[in-house]
Amino acid sequence: MRIYISCDMEGTAGVCSWNQCDPENRDEYPVYRRYMTQEVRAAVDGAREGGATEFLVNDSHWSMRNLLWEELPGDVRVVSGAPKPHSMAERIDDGVDAVFLTGYHAKGGDLDGVLAHTFSDETVYRVAINGTECSEALIVAALAGAHRVPVLLVTGDSTIVNETLRALPWVTGVAVKDAIGFNATNSLTPSAAQAAIRAGARDAVANVARAEPFVFAPPVEVLLETARVENCDYIELMPGFERVTGRTVRFRAPDYATAYRAYVAAVRLGGAANVRA
Amino acid sequence: MKLYVSSDMEGVAGVSAWQQVDARTPHPEYAIFRRTYTQEVRAAIEGARDAGAGDVVVNDSHGPMRNLLLDELPSDIRVIFGNRKPYTMVQDADRGFDGAFFVGYHGGAGDADAVLCHTYTPSVVYEARINGVPCSEATINAGLLGYYGVPLLLVTGDRTTVEGVQAQMPWVRGAVVKESIGSFAADSISPPAAQRLIREAAREAISHAKDAKPYLFKAPIALEMGLVTAAQADLVATIPGFERTGGRGVRFVNDDYAVAFKAFVAAWRMGALAL
């Protein structure tokens, strides 16, 4: 069994500030970068105990080159660097059997979500696909689902874990912390979190038979509400995007992969408008 | 006669360096050439009116697109001001104009002997072609005007720019205000002489408007772009409808020129994110 791991950082044990996740930060980031890597390693180790044999890890946070290679098993592959057209789900179509989402966080606007955002807190206010308001976890899960691949594991704060389990009830969730608002948390220690993730990953792989692909039925409609009017001014330039209101655009596609790529492009181009004209 | 004026700054008499047209820093020389620029736009309007033009809309199309000294223009015109217009240098070209002027225009990216030559974004666009035709800003913009049935009547700028436009649109009148010596030097006539020349050419352009034609690209519109770097092409290729044609090449095809024009704007804005 080949496992794909999309690993983010905000949902790592102990994380409660952007400073801990900002690659430019010289004090806290090096510490939490190691914890992030160790949580990925715990997921790999647990999955192997459950019977998984191959691993493709997609570093999905910020610069997307956070993982410390020397602290990962020698036989994993790592997708590293940015930008990638499929961003947090790059290479999810590369013949994998199941997906793990580690270090994930709540969606923009969630109550009690540590560093809650959806791809970009400066650009994305809310995104709904076929009427369902989406977290990054759901958006990535649906791309896996479009390739008939199920998500087995999600780790992060209890807000994103519970939210993901409501939409994908077959998923094994490991809540490493509870959010106390946006910038505070009541967390397990890193070592306890890693032990929980290892056990969760083992269970998740053992329970693969009950997992299902999560699918948005085509045609797919993305309704993107942006932080500012200027974001939509730029997004609307792209073919296929329709302006709905000052801060809302709509994109319709015959298949989810096309819609996903358009959404990623929209977040990028919309973000270009965040500098003053 | 309702006239549309798209005004840029690099093709203004005396301009030979980015500092002179840099509204963002801005360099002390910008204040000088901003006035020369405004005076050339005014000369074009006055010449057009000598020949009977009535309503005039000027689209400030340079940099942040708020350069014109409004007090120094005729008081009865309208001005399109500000950046981030979806149709940028030809915004509102669909509002029933009878003809258009390009004032202060410059050569396309890669042109020899064209002061400050570029195509929208020097650091992103290496080359652009539509239906195989190499495009300067003038070409692309004239294509949108043509799509709305508006013929280009006049272009002013350096010789390379004016002759480049006339090679594609032989009916266009030109006012050559300088000869470029490479990218950063020019042999220029004086601003007052340039303004007299522009006024005269504008009058002639309006007088002969009936000889002009809308410049049209036939559908399907195939936009091909070479980006400066492969990293920029990585991003541009993520725009819906774009296909990658090479390390630095992308292609976009659509039946509607206005859609292709906006896609082009999206492309260089997206590409700029990889700077």
Image (spheres, coloured by chain):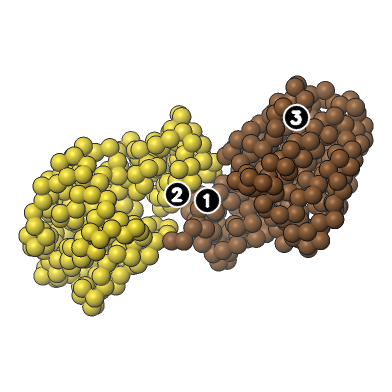
Location of residue A241 in the rendering, given as x and y in whole percent from the top left corner = 55, 53
Q: Say above or below: A67 vs B262.
A: above
Location of residue B41 in the rendering, given as x and y in whole percent from the top left corner = 20, 64
Q: Quadrant of residue B71?
A: bottom left
Compare residues B53 and B116 and report the one nearer the observer.
Answer: B116
Point out the tag, 3 or 1, that comes first from the N-terminus: 3
CA–CA distance in space, label 2 to label 3: 39 Å
Q: Which residue is mark 2?
A: B269
Location of residue A90 in the rendering, given as x and y in whole percent from the top left corner = 66, 35
Q: Quadrant of the C terminus of chain A?
A: bottom left
Query: What is the number of the mark on residue A71?
Result: 3
Q: Same chain for labels 3 and 1? Say yes or no.
A: yes
Dot in front, 2 or 3? 3
Task: Name the chain under label 1.
Answer: A
Location of residue B199 in the rendering, given as x and y in whole percent from the top left corner = 11, 63
Q: Secondary structure at mark 2?
A: helix
Q: Residue at x 30, y 56 (%)?
A: B22
Q: Is residue A264 left or right of residue B206?
A: right
Compare residues A99 and A103 and report the one nearer the observer.
Answer: A103
